[in-house]
Image: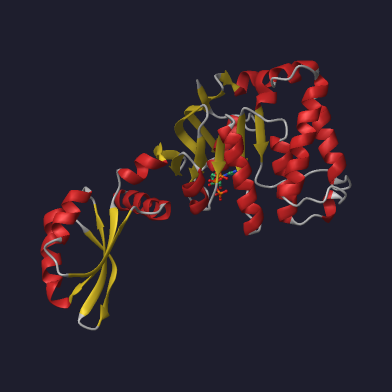
Amino acid sequence: MMGIEFNNVKKYYGKSRGVDHLNLKIVEGDFFGFVGPNGAGKTTAIKALLNLIIPDSGSVKILGVDTQKQIRKIKTAIGYMPSEVNLYEDFTVEKLFSMNRSLYLNHENAVLQGHRSKKAFEADMRKLENEMVQRLMIDPSKKFKALSLGNRKKIGFVLSTVHRPKVLILDEPTSGLDPLVQDELMKLLIKFNMEGMTIMLSSHTLSEVENNCKSVGLIKDGKMLKHESMETLKRHNLKTVDLTINRSELNLLEHWSHQYDATKLGEIRALGSFVKITYKMPQDIHTILSSLSQLTLEDVDIYNPSLETLFMHYYHQEVSHD
Ligand SMILES: Nc1ncnc2c1ncn2[C@@H]1O[C@H](COP(=O)(O)OP(=O)(O)OP(=O)(O)O)[C@@H](O)[C@H]1O
């Protein structure tokens, strides 16, 4: 079954485009990274998915259920962390946690979440809550109004995950968090995903998506530009080749550029009689190696592009086609 589906979703705010014929399918058990520039439509898509805004047309589903029509049916199966966490300012974190737990506590939800009784469900939530309090360094005695932006985010994370949702949707969860907490939060997400949770993570931190997600979707101008598994995206794309060669061989490279459709990236840097140059090559590794064997190499480094490089590549490609 699909974890999450967007079918031709369109949402305009007056004349301003939110998303426009957005199509996206995320399989159950995926850890999906949702990336795109500011204003591309990520938050609009997430809000439409959660029935927080009503799309102009199209449909959205979580675990096969149309959330515009029947979100109540699967509320317990969903966890959502918004990009800005606003809660009762005068309540302590402890109080917010216990209120959150009580919202889920009934026999039906306990059974839905795989527990024998309400008591067992509560015990499981308390256990996970305590683990996250330790790992994310949360002070439960503090009032919400006394918390910094980053500490508020941690509370939002606990509230959205403690009932172990089947599908978790996070809108820029790590922005504003220090690197240690960011790392801990990502480790928790990986653990949840390994336990079967489907995760949709919207993020501007491309390295975070690259290092942790199983698949990635690039959105631009309200439409999906690319959606692939991280492995395929990297495997099928250009290799970056850093070369240090004798200056006299530069003309060979020129010839090679035309022959193989390789692209020079950045400027040539002179190092005495040698030059350092970076190429982007669309060929398979055998073609790259046979080309390189024609050169007198001082040094070479061949690597898969980072998600950041791919992101720039696709966005620039689109811009140049516009
Ligand atoms: N309430 C609103 N009223 C009018 N326009 C809106 C509203 N909300 C979003 N938009 C517009 O819809 C477009 C998509 O915005 P959205 O917040 O979904 O993008 P995003 O990809 O989440 O951006 P960011 O990465 O900056 O958070 C933007 O052009 C934005 O200005």
The image shows residue 260 at horizontal and vertical percentages of 15, 54
Q: Which residue appears at 47% of the width and 39% of the height?
A: 214
Q: Give ligand 1's quarter of the image.
A: top right
The image shows residue 129 at horizontal and vertical percentages of 76, 39
Comparing 13 with 131, the one in front is 131
Q: In this view, does 267 lie to the left or right of 261?
A: right
Q: Is residue 206 above or below residue 28?
A: below
The image shows residue 287 at horizontal and vertical percentages of 16, 51
Label tally: 0
Residue at the bottom extreme of this rendering: 272
Q: In this orientation, does residue 58 appear? A: no
The image shows residue 147 at horizontal and vertical percentages of 80, 54
Q: In this orientation, does residue 249 appear? A: yes
Q: In this view, does 236 lie to the left or right of 197?
A: left
Q: Which residue appears at 60% of the width and 46% of the height?
A: 186
Quadrant in the picture for residue 124? top right
Comparing 185 with 255, the one in front is 185
Q: Is residue 113 above or below residue 216?
A: above
Comparing 143 with 86, the one in front is 143
Comparing 167 with 36, the one in front is 167
Quadrant in the picture for residue 113? top right
Q: Which residue appears at 32% of the width and 44% of the height?
A: 235
Q: Which residue appears at 74% of the width and 36% of the height?
A: 128
Q: In this view, does 49 lie to the left or right of 153?
A: left
Q: In this view, does 275 lie to the left or right of 39?
A: left
